[in-house]
Amino acid sequence: MHLSLSLSLIAVVGVTLFTTTPTSAQVASPPKLRCKCLPTDGCWPNEATWTEFGKTVGDRLIATTPVARECHAPYLDQAKCEEIVKGYHKDTWRSLQPGAVMSANWETFRGEGCLLNQTAPCTQGEVPLYTVKALSVADVETTIRFASKHNIRLVVKNTGHDYLGRSTAMNSISLWTHFMKGIKFDDKYTPEGAPAGTEGTDAIILEAGVVWDEAYKAAHENNRMVVGGNHPTVGTSGGFCQSGGHGPLSPRHGLCVDNVLQYKIVTADGILRIANAYQNQDLFWALRGGGPSYGVVVEAVYRTHPPASFVLIVSKITAPDEATMLAISQAFYAHQSQLSKDGQATHSPVPTTSFWLIISPTAPWIPPRLPLSPSLTLCVPSLELKSKWRTMPRSPHTRHSSMPG
Ligand SMILES: Cc1cc2nc3c(=O)[nH]c(=O)nc-3n(C[C@H](O)[C@H](O)[C@H](O)COP(=O)(O)OP(=O)(O)OC[C@H]3O[C@@H](n4cnc5c(N)ncnc54)[C@H](O)[C@@H]3O)c2cc1C
């Protein structure tokens, strides 16, 4: 994430949308682009400056190394390597490593990096050089200001689960929010700056490091539901909700962005801002679907809902070969919009020869509209459909009422 670029983007959006007569300065001066400072450049901070910076963030500055390093000569450490091998393919273990993201390919660049099985030398690849394990808003502000002052690339990471690899980058400082775990509830929440008399809303207030599993569990214990994603280890404040956020409850309660009441965010100038319907509305608008690039969210407030049952159907369809699987996928996607109109949330990861289908009708009294078997057979007449269906009523007394897993 390029914070300096993001701030320019906010400025550009502001000019385009809200200014009718541009000033001469707005017309004349396009934003100046500067290349980021690299370790080989004179602008790179020296050891003493890094040490000093470390003290300002409670000595939680980590010199980051790739996660598989101790399995490679000359860093080989047998005991550590065994631990690495055990955790290497687990997303929960990866979330807890400063040098890892969920998809190891994002830790490499043009073949350079440090994967577990590679025989090539272990190099830094796309792994950040430093990580700040942030525990407070002050840590976030201090890190942004340091990166800005020294013109160093900054990335933000909670879980590292970003499918686009945006939470890791070469020669960067990583701002790691994963341990900011505060969760609060307010049954009469009003956004800051709302006019007196504004009616309160049931809300969950989440610090930046909370993941959906933790939010679901807390909501469940408070007899509430919250719109999150399908997978428990995804973060609540980052790429999920800022990019829309689709989950099993979406047909009933909308996307995650439809449920945001307020964000607290540190922008690229290192200033903490509040964005809601009453202040910084343009920023609030951008944060609800514009993608994670407008600053570092330190607190998100989402609407909660009363508990309700829903039905979960999980199916695995297997096909003899990839061509058949492709035909099945195409037939399924032809039904996707009808399924959504019928109030069903579907998730369908498509590996090469099997097809996981997770369907969550939003109310048990809506019979799941699943003309899939006949339709698929119609589209792929030669297909022998092997699928298992499992239907489970969900209610507040099941594991966490907001999620299917
Ligand atoms: C197993 C799995 C299941 C998924 N299921 C769903 C699903 O059901 N529905 C759905 O909509 N999506 C789903 N996704 C996609 C997921 O929402 C995105 O990959 C998302 O970007 C992950 O966000 P994260 O914060 O966990 O990851 P991270 O990699 O930590 O961060 C993702 C992005 O957000 C930025 N970011 C993180 N924290 C902050 C912050 N506090 N402030 C500003 N920026 C921040 C990072 O810089 C990065 O750009 C799934 C992903 C995975 C891996």
Image: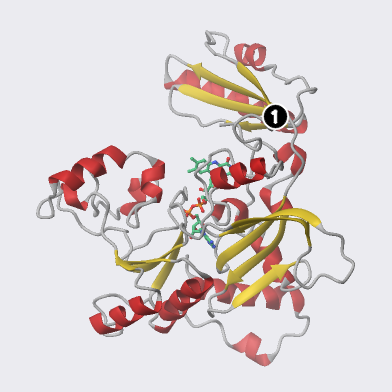
Which image quadrant for residue 334? top right
On-image quarter of the C terminus: top right
Closest to the observer, 99 or 44: 99
Left or right: 381 with respect to 366? left
Q: In terms of depth relative to the viewer, which is nearer, 289 or 300?
A: 300
Q: Is residue 334 above or below residue 126?
A: above
Query: Residue 359 appears at what percent x and percent y?
Result: 64, 27
Residue 33 drawn at (x, y percent): 46, 79
Residue 31, x across and y down, in percent: 54, 81
The residue labelled by disc 1 is 395
Tag 1: residue type? Ser
Percent of width and height locating residue 192: 75, 70
Which residue appears at 50% of the width and 60% of the height?
180
Q: Is residue 194 above or below residue 45?
A: above
Residue at the image point whose x is 59% and y is 72% from the top: 9
- Picture quarter containing residue 327? top right
State whether label 1 is within 8 Å of ligand 1: no
Viewer-proximal residue, 15 or 129?
129
Residue drawn where x is 76% and y is 19% of the image: 367
Q: Residue at x 71, y 33 (%)?
A: 337
Secondary structure beneath dot 1 equals loop
Residue farthest to the right? 197
**What's the colour scheme?**
secondary structure
